[in-house]
Amino acid sequence: MIKRMITLLFSISALFSGEHRFDAQRAFQFLEKQVAFGYRIPGTDDHKACADWIIERCSALADTVIVQSFSAYNPYTKKWVEARNIIARFRPGETDRVMLSTHFDTRPVSDRDFAKPFMPVPGANDGASGTAVLLELLDKIHALNMKAGLDIIFWDAEDMGIAGSGKYFCQGSEYYALHPLEPLPQKGILIDMIGDKDLELLIEKNSMLYAPELVLSVWNIAAELGYQHIFKKQTGPEVYDDHMPLNTLAGIPTIDIIDFSYTYSGRNLWHTTKDLPAFCSPQSLLCVGETLLLWLSRQ
Ligand SMILES: [Zn+2]
């Protein structure tokens, strides 16, 4: 038992030292760069430029990259636009697989911003934070020597929906769930809104319903790393996010790691024009990035 503990501690320290460690500063630069592209609204040139940049990094680091093109509906312009899910695969032939995912598009309207509801959301937290973490993880994967294969997926067209109705959200993950890539992963972790400076990660209800063992294993790994004050073992609200098409349509048990409260001085920043890098932090990206890295090393 002692020997196992020593081996375990050694593997954790090896994972978090030197070139294999999660580089929080670089991840934060990835977040800032996405915001600098402009609003990543499907159908716009800024969105296309950002997607091309993500594809470029995936192509340099993954074993294969598959770009899944589909048409997405923007209910605000009432137009169909071109959208793309970006799928970076490691060990693509391995049938025993896991998935990490996030969305990279941003919301066309700031409908929670009562001063500027018709302006788009800059999406530093909602879009760029999860994408920054997964872009940073891409070049750590080969060194992990995982047994399982891995799909890292950047969903498009997650945030064009109409608030309240639930319609037109998660169009990219829904398209994938109806057109999945073989071999299919057996479990998945979605990250969304994890860049908040004041990060608090409660357990999302649907995640607990569809993949309770996965929730507990991830929250336990975070505690192992000393992040139990952020990954709190308390039940939070339920959300309809990209994990839902995966759970209900594709049958891939998937959890959502998401911060339900994105505020500054008591004021909501979520779906407002104030969703900016200034309210996000490298430390929050690090906490989620290191947890995912340790989880992956055991797959
Ligand atoms: Zn959103």
Image: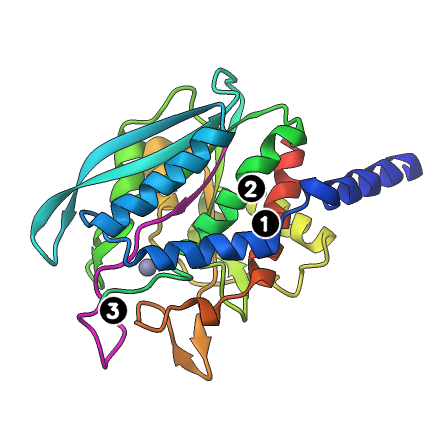
x then y, percent, for residue 53: 37, 42
Query: From where the camera sits, is residue 229 visible?
Result: yes
Residue 68 coordinates in the image, percent (x, y): 29, 30
Give the image location of residue 156, x and y in percent: 30, 44
The residue most toward the bottom is 265
Q: Amino acid at mark 1?
A: Gly
Q: Main secondary structure of the magenta part?
A: loop
Residue plotted at (44% across, 34% down): 58
> Residue, x 59% and y 49% (percent of image)?
289
Q: Look at the picture and state if 58 lies above or below 80.
A: above
Question: Separation of disc 1 and disc 3 at Cα?
Answer: 28 Å
Toward which corner of the image does residue 228 lie, by quadrant? bottom right
Residue nearest the viewer, comparing 225 with 60: 60
Judge from the rendering whether residue 5 lies leftward or rightward of residue 173; answer left or right: right
Q: Nearer the viewer, residue 131 or 296?
A: 131
Q: Is residue 127 visible?
A: no
Specify which label sits upstream in the sequence, 3 or 2: 3
- What residue did someone put label 1 on? 289
What type is the residue that disc 2 sits on? Leu
Q: Quadrant of the N terminus?
A: top right
Res. 260 mark: none
Report if the CB atoms under discs 2 and 1 are less than 8 Å apart. Answer: yes
